[in-house]
Image (spheres, rainbow, N blue to C red):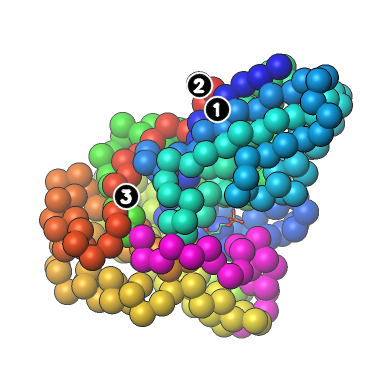
Amino acid sequence: MKATAIAPANIAFIKYWGKADDARRLPLNPSISMNLSACITTTTVEFSPDFEKDTVSEGFDEKRILTHIDRIRRIAKINMCSKITTKNSFPASAGIASSASGFAALTVAAAAALGLKLGELELSVLARLGSGSACRSIPDGFVKWEDSYAYSLYPPSYWDLRDILLIIENNVKDVSSSAGHEGAYTSPFFTKRLQEVPKRISRLEAALAKKDFQKLGEVIEEDCLDVHHVMQTQSPPLFYWNEKTRQVIRAIKKSGLPVYFTIDAGPNVHLICEAKDEKQVIDIFGNTYQIIVNKPSRGARLC
Ligand code: PMV
């Protein structure tokens, strides 16, 4: 009873921040993301009556992973212990949130190892219970998450975009996004954000439909700035950016290139551009920062 799955991380163009239901990780707003081809988790899950206890690869959050395995074991009504081996394609110390790719790969591998025949929607629901944004790493390409599950808006081949990820800092963030969501309500700007997001979702969907890169980039930046404004005005405030993050944003704006920034719960900057501008963007930052070049990717799948 063994299966291996791979899953990509994803970058949110319109971000999920704040939960309607903490335990079930139901979001207060819809979000849209792109799966990342070069930020991949590979996970093997094996169940055997010979195992005396559960084991998880070193360096990963064992408690959170086993809580998720318990969930899947309950569905399958199987009690055997598991061996979980997982690795990321990106350096463990790169400060890239791996919970989305991690819980998507874990869900697909564990469900298959236990013989559960789940469709994409059910896998997305299940992955969400491990980590909210993981539900967006199950479907292919450009993905929308509404309420309980995520689905593909367009396949990866739809638009040859790049996410040029600049690794600004190698340290793991002090406050996890899971904890951060819980404080969102305390920001005086959160209600305003929730009112604005549906309009941004419509604008982003229109830009995607027309492949209007400028409009896409503008709304991506607007939502990034808005979500970080909420984070910074929560109680306690969350400051995920540092001076280098701000320097990169200034350099990008000064360059005049058609490239737009977005930032998750950490200081690393994702630079979104079209394939034709990839080289010029890399030329600006390639000597200063470690760079990971991502294309739109398929979602989670068995190997
Ligand atoms: O899925 P979580 O709990 O790690 O939250 C993700 C939060 C952001 O990365 C900031 C936004 C998003 O939608 O990915």
Mark 1 neighbour class, 10 Å CA radius: few under 14, some 14 to 19, many 20 or more: many
Give residue 245's position: percent from left, percent from top: 35, 72
Give residue 127's position: percent from left, percent from top: 65, 39
| Residue for badge 3 | 292
Q: Tell me what residue is drawn at x 65 percent, y 61 percent.
A: 178
Q: Is the shortest distance between ligand 1 and the CB of mark 3 under 8 Å?
A: no
Residue 234 to residue 43: above or below: below
| Residue 161 appears in the picture as rendered | yes
The circle on residue 303 is 2
Q: Earlier in the sequence, mark 1 or mark 3?
A: 1
Magenta segment: 167-189
* Along the viewing direction, whichever of 55 and 70 lies nearer the viewer: 55
Q: Does residue 259 show up magenta in the picture?
A: no
Q: Earlier in the sequence, mark 2 or mark 3?
A: 3
* Along the viewing direction, whichever of 103 and 253 lies nearer the viewer: 103
* Along the viewing direction, whichever of 285 and 55 lies nearer the viewer: 55
Q: Amino acid at mark 3?
A: Ile
Mark 3 neighbour class, 10 Å CA radius: few under 14, some 14 to 19, many 20 or more: some
Q: Tell me what residue is drawn at x 71 percent, y 17 percent.
A: 1
Mark 1 and mark 2 in contact (Cβ < 8 Å)?
yes
| Residue for badge 1 | 5
